[in-house]
Structure formats: structure tokens, C-alpha cells
Amino acid sequence: MDTADTDFVWTELDEQVAAIDGATYPELQRMLADGADPNVRTPDGVSALVSACMGDQWRYDMLVAAGAQLPEDDLPLALHYACERGCKSGLVDELLQRVAHLDPHVWAPMAMHGATHSGDVWLLKKLLRAGAPVNCRDERGRTPLHMAVGFYRDLNMLVLLVDAGADVDAEDDAGATALDYVERREGIACPEDHPRGPDELAAAEWLRALMRASQTRAGALAYPRGRLSGRLDATRDVGPYVLYAKVISEPVSTFFAAHRRDDDAERLLVRVLHDHLADDRRHVEAFLAEGRAGMALGPTVDVPVLDVGQADGAAYWVLEFERGVERACRPQPPVKWRQIPRWLP
């Protein structure tokens, strides 16, 4: 191609970096012994050592042994390349130690981008545990959830991000949500390097459900008492609690905003077994037993159960309002594709 038709001009420095990238183990040994510069950089600033992060770790180690340096400014790109490769070696761990003192927003967007591209769920988990913000944004305003959907490798990656607190309603700089990315993929031919799995339709439906749930949750948390979306025409007494607004229904029960009859200052969430199930002793006993188990676990669970009882013809649990709404509103992904624990060791 005529160089006049492109801004890129291949230089001798590019040639040297490419030679190091393409060399076999004995070839690289020979090149370095013959005086090849381990710190060579392309004109746009990519060093041979950073470029080596995309390949086998022996190349990186050999360059370091020959005196190659990795300045702090190179760390985010080096970590991005290592994560994009989906490295199972110690290279990612080594680079994470090097960036530990930096603001996570400096290195996390590129690293998370690389991990979502590789489809390596374990690597993504490692980045989150190292302090990568789950809603960090790249230069185009895209979050890791945007990228995980855009590259779409595995529903488990979406599950991990959502469980870690990813904002399903977040918009990139163009105003697109993660669900918009799904719908774009549904409407275009699938690139060979981004194969569309058979569960992608399920992922899209789950994201739609998550967005609906987040809107319900936001409405539940935003409205003051008596103004809640879904408020009841008349309050309902269940034991010592006054139910004044419906939050959301599920197959077994309905969640209501409530307060104690003798103390209306604290907002609570009361889960009430559906009336048509309340006549079946087995359903009632199972519902109450599950609630008591939650009480026994106490603060060791995400949403502790504060009270369990049966009164006024209803079996119920009582939960803290904010965390209870989060639990009630978030739909679970299809179990079929949940191949890994929600939180990995």
C-alpha cells in the first residue's frame, strides 16, 4: 500500500520490535547476544517489553533478564495486553503488584477491557479482587459490562460483573446501554472472532429483566412513604407491621414496603407468602423454615432476615428495606449457564 494513503509508516524501529515479537526462543537469545536493544520502542512509544506481554511469558522474562525496563507509564498498556491474552501464568500477578500503588482508574479500564476480550472469567475475578472498579470507564465511556456484552464470550462473565455491582443502566458516551450492545449484535452478522453462543439470547433476556428490575428498585428507593410506585389503596396489617406499598411480586411471594405499627420511622421490607399458597401447610412450613434459617445465619448473609412469623392469615419475613429491595428485584440468570460459583475463591 502506498504510504500516502495511510498515516502509518513502517520504520526500522517497528521492524526491530516485530523481529523480537516473532523470534523463537533460540533466535531471541541470539539476537540479544548480538546486541539487540531490549528497550527498543516503536515511534508511537510501544516498547518491545510491552509488546511481549501479548505473547508467551518466556519472551517477557528474557527481555527483563537482558535489561529491559517497564516504566510506570507503560504499566496500563502492558497489563491490558497480558489480560487480553488471557494469561494463566504469573505475568498478570506480577503486573498487578506493579500497579497496586496507582489509582485503579488509571489501569483498570484497559485491563478490564482486555479480560472481557479474552473471555477469561477467572482473570476478570482476579482484577476485581485487585481493586478494579466494576463500573470504570474507558475513553469512550464504556464500562466492563458494555465490553463483556460487546465481545460476548460467556454468560458467566456477565453474571460476575452484575454480582459485583455493575450498573446495567450505565450509558456510554453515545448514550448506549449494555442492552443496546446486545441488540446491535442481534442485528448484525457475527464476526468470526466474536462467535455468538447459543445462550446469547438468554443473556439478552436476562439483561432486559435486570434493567426492568433496576427501574423498579430505583422507584422503590426513591419515593417517600405513601408515594411509592404500586402503593396500596389501603394499608394492610400483618402481625406488628403495616404494609403500605407493593414493591414486586415473584412466583412464591410478594414484597411490600412496611413499617412497624408502633414505630413508623424505620422503613422495612416484608415478604408475604401468596394467599393461594398460604392454605397449603407444606408451603407455609417450607417458607417459614427458610426464613428462620436466614435469621439463624444473621449478619453472615447479604440480606439478614430480621423477623419471621405468621399472623392475620399470612406467613411473612421481614428484611432491611434497601438491601431487601436489591435482593427482591434482581432476577437470576438462567441456572443452565451458571457453570461457576457467583464468587470464586
Image (cartoon, rainbow, N blue to C red):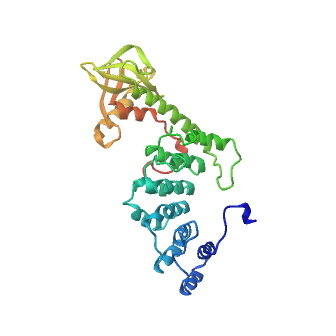
Residue at x 47%, y 28% (from the top left corner)? 216
- Horizontal arrangement in the rendering, residue 8 relative to residue 227 (left or right): right
Residue projecting furthest to the right: 1
Q: Quadrant of residue 325?
A: top left
Q: Position of residue 318 (x, y in %)?
A: 33, 28
Q: Classify 193 as above or below 40.
A: above
Image quadrant holding the C terminus, namely bottom left
Residue 98 visible in the shown view: yes
- Horizontal arrangement in the rendering, residue 77 relative to residue 10 (left or right): left
Residue projecting furthest to the front: 4
Q: Classify 259 as above or below 302.
A: above
Q: Position of residue 147 (x, y in %)?
A: 55, 49
Residue at x 46%, y 64% (from the top left corner)? 73
Q: Position of residue 135 (x, y in %)?
A: 46, 46
Image quadrant holding the N terminus, namely bottom right
Front-most of residues 2 and 124: 2
